[in-house]
Image: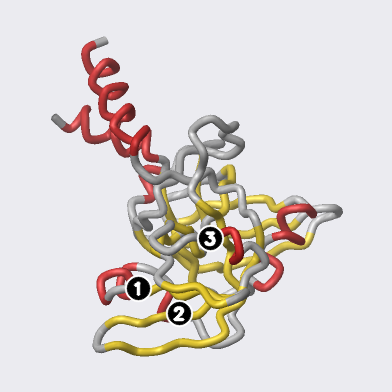
Amino acid sequence: MERLRLLMLQLKEYESKKMFTGIIEQVGKVVAITKNGSNKTFTVEADFTNELKVDQSVAHNGVCLTVESIDGRLYTVTAIDETLVKTALNNWNEGSLVNLERCMKMNGRLDGHIVQGHVDGVGSCINLEIKDGSWEYTFKTETRLDLIVEKGSICINGVSLTAFDVKDTTFKVAIIPYTFEHTNFNQLAVGDTINLEFDIIGKYVERLFKK
């Protein structure tokens, strides 16, 4: 009970921080990339740009980045070297389609799961099977797969999904037609690198039990 109490206290800390749900609002397009030292600035085109504000947080393929400037339908964000190294953002090119989600409102429904926009690591797509009405992807990762549990939540490129057939280094997800149509999963191919964020509750539970 004491461990559970500590867990709830730590989770409460995130009520005042930026969080996402893993429910993608729309797909944007990278229209320009500028290298600034070891950093990269991305110019993104999106339908909801007119609703954004400078200094607002937006998840891009699951990576939380801060809006720096706005110009019509375009806005810019910058990824520092550490983010580029630990995520798949270095693979972006002009024309890349990106899953976008603005930070959640605390008075709204949490339709996905708690997502921070802090990528834990990357994985790769090793198989795609087209089913009758869905798409089944198999991913491989060496990053903390012990935090993925059967039928548990996983965030892939910012999309809240349910993992199944979890093995030592691989797991699967099934994509329904709506998600396939409204995210960049319809662009994902075997061999592509993806961003992974594991369930925050699982990470807290693991830490508490290690103590």
Label 1 sits on residue: 79
Q: Residue at x 55, y 55 (%)?
A: 101
**Circle 2 Cα neighbour tier, 10 Å, few/some/many (<14 / 14–19 / ≥20):** many
Q: Position of residue 84 (x, y in %)?
A: 34, 75
Task: Give the amino acid at mark 1.
Answer: Ala
Q: Could you tell me which secondary element the residue under label 3 belongs to?
A: loop
**Circle 1 Cα neighbour tier, 10 Å, few/some/many (<14 / 14–19 / ≥20):** many
Nearer-N-terminus badge (3/2): 2
Q: Residue at x 70, y 53 (%)?
A: 175
Instruction: Return the mark for residue 42.
Output: 2
Instruction: Return the mark for residue 113.
Output: none
Q: Residue at x 68, y 50 (%)?
A: 174
Task: Give the amino acid at mark 3.
Answer: Leu
Q: Position of residue 112 (x, y in %)?
A: 57, 39
* Viewer-side label of 3, 1: 3
Q: Could you tell me which secondary element the residue under label 2 belongs to?
A: strand
Front residue of 204/137: it is 204
